[in-house]
Image (spheres, grey):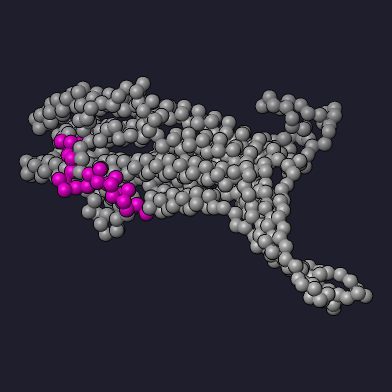
Amino acid sequence: MRLDGGRFPRKLSGAEGLVRGESGRPGFPIVNRPQRSADRTLQRLIALWLAAGMLAAAPAAAQQDAGQPQRNPIIEFPDLGPIPGSTEPSLGAAPGSLDPGMTAPGMGVIGGRRRTGRIPRGAKAKAGASSIATARGMRLPESLPAPVAPRAVAIPTTAIDTSIADDAGPPGGLTLDAAIATMMEANLDVRALRHELTQADADVLTAGLRTNPLIYMDSQFIPYGTFNNQSPGGPTQYDLNITYPIDVSKKRQARTVVARMARSALEAQFQDVVRRQIDNVYRAFTNLQAARLDHLAALASVRRQEQFLEQLEQSAKTGDADAADTIDHLSLVLARARGSLGDAAEAVADAQEGLALLLNLPPDQAADLQPQGSLRDAFHPPPPVEELIPLAVRCRPDLLAVRQGVTRASAEVDLQRANRFDDVYLFYDPITIQDNSPFNSPSANSWAVGLTFALPIYNRNQGNIARAQSNVQQTRLELSSLERRIASEVRLAEREYRTSLESLERIEKTMLPRAEASLRRRTEQFLKGDLTTDDYQGHLEDAAELTQSHREAMIRHRRSMLDLNTAVGLRLLP
């Protein structure tokens, strides 16, 4: 940082040389003491300003990281991106070009244009993407914020009630299976993406089309006037030519194979998008369950707090100052609890809105969405991780897409080799008429045949063949990388499943029984007058925190079960 007003110090010597200052740092020229004092003052001001800025930014950044809810995509953009195994570069097409590089061979006289893919379309990149299938497959847009239940103040309670966490919802509510089925049928983005498969079928049809023949008609030896003995020439000739291209290197068959492989990889990509969209339904449905349970807990706590306050008011003696203070304090606590109840109701509405958007329901039906299903882990445990990883390698559609991409890349090599040779053009002239009428002679008819082909001396498509071969190796490396990433995802999901289950069991088997016994003792002491209101209020808040932690542990474990399904690519756990 320059503190000399933008001017660089000139080289000094002697007494004006650079010396070490009081701070022990060299590099400040001695001009005079007032100037040095001013520089120090300016440095201190700048240091204080920078420190204040860093201190102000640190809590904001921490709050953003810790308090910002995890955003999960609930909308799929109709953007496929490059197909795995294609020759399109991972960094995008060349500037100003619609083709993914110098891959289109020469047209020759007629036909033979090779399919070079679609015009690239931009999409918003997902932050923190860790999958090749996400980077090179169908991309995700910015997601809607996930609703989060308010955690400002834990609502006090007079008893630890764990029955709310076991509430499975209304009997006629929406189940998870029904939500997935509705999303598959009604989600507009999934329906829009299905048209990409139809377009791929059209590309296969286009790749298999033959090149059209040419019909050429001409006239030669047309005189300026007439031919005679003084200006002999002719006779005038009329030709009808048919030129038929012959694909001797079987480029059309190679194009068709590449298009079919691209269609297979595209179908696997579509299945992967469906897998991730089902994961979005998992998260939206679980968010709605969590918001609903928080709302029920807040409502029950408010009711218990109202009953407790009413009992204190009835039992309080007239003129008792301590009882009046207690009632005033509990009235404030009740007001805060009612405010938290309103926040919980808003979180439920937000969660209903997110799920309704995924299911393509009208806005007026979003408020009627009520989840039905228990959070309790009453299912058979999943197989060990040694069996889950091979299962994921077989079932994950994004891995299948890259495998199809390797096959497509190999077919692309065959196509580039076939493009070494241009079409051979068979020339056939079925009739040639020579007009001999100016010489008072009968006209003559004849036919002709010929063959036109290019000599592969200079351009044998060497560059594109080498590029296609390199693309095969690149796609194989991406396949190996994706296999390792999928194995890591399965291990992380299985570890989270075990950890969340252990945490839930620890709360239910150890912490909840202790807390219930302790709260009963504290309640008896408070009713006898052996415990002050503030102390009892602290125990109530601790009990409320524990019950809320229990609900969150159940939600966490339920999410870990669904995340394991997504990581494996198979519905292992309901």
Q: Is residue 176 magenta?
A: yes
Image coordinates of residue 382 in percent, x first then y, are: 28, 26
Res 235 → quadrant:
bottom right
561 versus 318 height, above or below: above
Direction right: furthest residue: 230
Quadrant location, the C terminus: top left
Q: Nearer the viewer, residue 222 or 106?
A: 222
Closer-to-camera residue (118/215): 215
* Residue 71 located left or right of residue 417: left
Seen at 55% across and 44% down, the residue is: 253
Question: Can the viewer see residue 101?
Answer: no
Q: Residue at x 60, y 49 (%)?
A: 114
Residue 290: tell me if it is visible: yes
Q: Residue furthest bottom?
A: 225
Q: Furthest residue to the front?
A: 441
Residue 540 drawn at (x, y percent) = 20, 34
Q: Which residues are magenta?
A: 163-188
Q: Quadrant of the N terminus?
A: top right
Residue appearing at x 86%, y 70% in the figure: 233
Question: Left or right of 42: which side holds 314?
Answer: left
Query: In the visual, does 558 lie left or right of 172?
Result: right
Q: How many callouts does the rendering have?
A: 0
Of residues 51 and 221, the one drawn nearer to the viewer in this rendering: 221
Q: Is residue 36 above or below residue 334?
A: above
Q: Is residue 121 magenta?
A: no
Task: Give x and y (percent) for residue 85.
Answer: 54, 38
Q: Quadrant of residue 220?
A: bottom right
- 526 sits left or right of 122 in the view: left
Residue at 59 percent across and 38 percent down: it is: 414
